[in-house]
Image: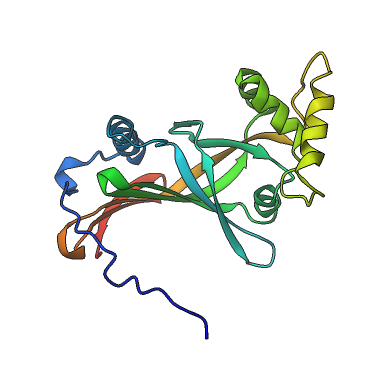
Amino acid sequence: MSSSKDLHDNRRNYTLSQLTEDHISPNPFQQFGTWFDEAGKGGILEPNAMALSTVDANGRPSSRIVLLKAFSEDGFVFYTNYHSRKGRDIAADDQVALLFFWDKLERQVRIEGKVEKTTANLSEEYFTSRPYESRLSAVVSEQSEEIPNREYLEDKLIALRQQESIKRPEHWGGYIVKPDYFEFWQGRASRLHDRIVYELDHGAWKIKRLAP
């Protein structure tokens, strides 16, 4: 018989803060920027770490942590291998979701919208700015493909280091998520959490509160 672990008592009460309609920005990008800055000052190790959820051509979802590299009212930018599983998912369905969880602040932010590739110039600029070892790994890794062993990667890395210059692979670059939905979640006592939603409606952001 398989064993199970009871997690019913593994809980905490959230009491740090609150989220009210009269203390938020009417612009969700500005609200995100405020919370992002507070996450950085609040001791979050990597406030730009976010769960990216995609769906493949068969409707099967998958999620993974990626790093946000830029954001503005144009959208949220991250970089990856276009041939990876997430890249293949995006090619099949351009609807994605992002999730930020900042545990020390008892906050999370959900973002949904369409994703598209950034310009090649932007991808080139970012690739060139990356540390040398990170550029090497982007070239060496056939992301999401099966490989025989760890040595396979290390051997490719040794061979690549012999080259004079490292060029950005055409299959590596940026994506930008253009949101039509934001949800800001603030933990509250007794599980009566605050949830404020922004939805894009004919070019304007509509704000509403959801039950926890």
Measured as percent of width and height from the top left, residue 162 is found at 84, 18
Measured as percent of width and height from the top left, residue 42 is found at 27, 34
Q: Quadrant of residue 11?
A: bottom left
Question: Left or right of 178: which side holds 135?
Answer: right
Measured as percent of width and height from the top left, residue 147 is found at 80, 49
Above or below, 173 against 82 in this view is above
Above or below, 72 against 18 in this view is above
Question: Left or right of 17: which side holds 196?
Answer: right
Comparing 99 with 203, the one in front is: 99
Residue at (71% x, 47% y) in the render: 84
Residue at (72% x, 27% y) in the render: 136
Comparing 18 with 200, the one in front is: 18
Colour mapping:
rainbow
Residue at (34% x, 41% y) in the render: 28
Comparing 140 with 57, the one in front is: 140
Residue at (59% x, 62% y) in the render: 61
Above or below, 69 against 95 in this view is above
Q: Quadrant of residue 120?
A: top right
Q: Tag count in the figure?
A: 0
Measured as percent of width and height from the top left, residue 188 is found at 18, 56
Q: Where, quadrant-wise, is the C terminus in this rendering?
A: bottom left
Q: Quadrant of residue 137?
A: top right
Residue at the extreme bottom: 1
Residue at the extreme top: 164
Above or below, 110 against 55 in this view is above
